[in-house]
Amino acid sequence: MTRITIEVNGIMVGGNTHQNLLEQLEDAGIQPEYQCRNGMCGACRCKLNQGSVTQGDAMAFVMPGEILACQSAPQTDVSIAFDYQPAEIKKQVNEA
């Protein structure tokens, strides 16, 4: 597994090359919009500003330069942008 950096709307988070972007952003506390998680609806559509991804099959329409976060796994450091600012959930650290 290769560690990479994901920049989403100016927020930097750590990531990997084996999980899709939607899952990685959720794990980091960022909540992009989605409805289906399988490439049908297009709600998680975003612009790929920099880097490369492997995108699985999808039924939703994407313009050149756009990807579906639910179907795209980053292969390098990536910079993506949604047309809106995704909500951020602050993760609570449990202290023993």
Image (cartoon, rainbow, N blue to C red):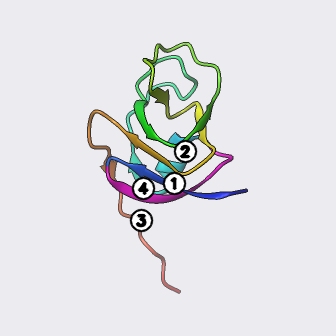
Which span of residues is magenta-colored? 10-19
Spatial CA span between label 1 and label 3: 9 Å
Identify the residue at image location x=45%, y=75%.
93
- Residue with the mark numbered 1: 27
Q: Residue at x 59, y 37 (%)?
A: 53
Residue furthest out toward the bottom? 96
**Which sits in the foreground, 90 or 58?**
58
Q: Amino acid at mark 4?
A: Gly
Determine which residue is flagged by label 3. 91
When the figure is inspected, residue 28 is found, relative to residue 95, above or below; the finding is: above
| Residue marked by disc 4 | 29
- Circles 4, 3 touching at the beta carbon (< 8 Å): yes
Are circles 1 and 3 on residues that touch, CB within 8 Å? no
Residue annotated with mark 2: 23
Q: Earlier in the sequence, mark 1 or mark 3?
A: 1
State yes or no: discs 1 and 2 in contact (Cβ < 8 Å). yes
Q: Amino acid at mark 3?
A: Lys
User: Circle 4 sits in a helix, a strand or a loop, which is it?
Assistant: loop
